Amino acid sequence: MAEGTNVETKIERSEMEKLYNESIKLVIEGQVIKGRIVAVKTKEVLIDVGFKSEGIVAITEFRKDELAVGSELDFFVESIEDEAGAIALSREKARHMQSWDTIVKAFDNNDLVEGNIVKKVKGGFLIDSMGIEGFLPASLSAFKGVPEKDILNRTFKFKIVKINKLRYSIILSRREAVQKEKEKAKERIWKELVVGGICPGTVKAITDFGAFIDLGGVDGLLHITDMSWSKISHPSEIVAVGDRLEVLVLNIDKESNKVTLGLKQRFPDPWQEIDKKFSPGLKVKGKVVNILPYGVFVELEKGIEGLIHVSEMSWAKKVNNPSEVFAIGDMIETQILSVDRDSRRIALSIKQLEQNPWLDSESKYPPGTKVQGKVKGFTKYGVFVELDSNLEGMIHISDLSWTKRINHPQDILKKGQKVEVVVLSVESQNQRISLGLKQLQLNPWSEIAQKYPLDTTLETEVVSLTEFGVFVKIEPDLEGLVFSNEIDPEQLKMLKVGDKLQVKVIKVDVEQCKIGLSAKV
């Protein structure tokens, strides 16, 4: 009986030893194993790794958020048994080995890693990526022009271009990471873009025809015609580089990588109900927003503009340059002439607000009336004179003098000069008043014909040479023409302005106010 009991006891002891040995993990130096914090002391932490003895790790190797009894963490086995008989573990080395494994895996898979820029060193920057030391060459940094304060102690993504397994160090490239991130963003944006969708973007560049918008890796074109319902002269009136916008996708062409965007389409078209707001004959106020040689554009409300053509600016005055009359920002009152919703045009008038002075112009200025006026401007064929009713008349160059040959009206009159003139004719339908200056005096040509009968010989002075003859001065304000066939060719070649020339009267045209001469005396 006793012998049987001893046998059973030996069997139980053997099984207990077997169970105990099986409960102890196989721990090998240099490997990373799981451990559970069982106690946190002042300078060290006790770790249960399922071995026959507990491990000890310096408390400085832990982050504050890791120091909790019961927490399971990874540890590196430095030795199975140290001088105190405990297993020696390291939390820092475990983290380092895991980080290195992650680095190697990222390198093999061509993945990006994050890293913090620790400091600037010769030739580049020192990087901390998950506790692994990395070097970022300046040539691969893509930090050209970026202030140092915006780089140091900040986290960026990098691509690993080289690893050193012996020194556990790496060489990184931010330039390639940036490019890869752009490509990923581009792929994502192309998948997300849909016609009719609204997406955010940043104004990247401005041209005369529109603005390019960065949608986050894909550029889209916002054409000038899709920026505003109002007419604009240049995209810079609406957007500026760096502006953040919410734009509508109008069209997508993946084959040519083109995206067409719209801004005005996000808002109601103000022209849809234009007929209800504006009608012909209505008096409206607006702001001058654009001035062109042919007229002035007036903003009646946001997105609605009308044109005052130069012909609708004044009954009396001919406006050649609207910028002399109006300025951008002027608030003016106008009258609507017509509304064309399909063409998006509104014709406006200022002169329709005033009484038409041409209606009684014929009765007010009968032919032969002497009136006072002020010289307003010149053309090569005459002078414009403003009358006291603000109507303008014109003195033709032929009506400035009875006898003097005039090449430039400015030789006779000056701008702003007050003059007395004679009304020659009024055409109210065509809005024309013809004026005369020479008609203030009697026509002297009957007397001239008597004074210079045919075959009269005269000593004259050459005043100009033309293809058809030579003009000579007979009196201070009287010139005659020596026809080219009435002068010897050799003599003609030698003549110059100021030369004396003896001539003979061969024709006096009282109606045309001309004297014909011959040098063949």
Image (cartoon, rainbow, N blue to C red):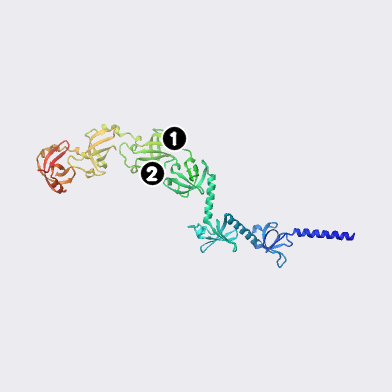
* Coordinates of residue 385 in the picture (x, y in percent): 26, 40
Residue carrying label 1:
274
Kind of residue sitting beneath label 2: Ile
Give whichever of discs 1 and 2 has the lower sequence position: 1
> Horizontal and vertical percent for residue 48?
71, 60
Q: Residue furthest right?
A: 1
Position of the N terminus by quadrant: bottom right
Element type at marker 2? loop
**Along the viewing direction, whichever of 156 and 357 lies nearer the viewer:** 156
Which of the labelled discs sits on residue 121, or is there none? none
Q: Looking at the rendering, which quadrant does residue 456 occupy?
A: top left
Rendered view: 423 above or below 76: above
Which-is-in-front pick, marks 1 and 2? 1
For the residue marked with disc 1, what is the amino acid? Ile
Disc 1 to disc 2, C-alpha distance: 24 Å
Which image quarter: residue 127? bottom right
Left or right of 275? Residue 487 is: left
In this rendering, would 425 be left or right of 453? right
- Residue 230 x, y percent position in the rendering: 43, 41
266 or 496, which is in the foreground? 496
Return the residue at label 2.
Answer: 328
* CB under 8 Å between discs 1 and 2: no
Q: Is residue 160 above or below residue 235?
A: below
| Residue at 47% from the left image edge and 41% from the top image edge | 264
Residue 309, visible in the rendered structure: yes
| Rendering quarter of residue 326 | top left
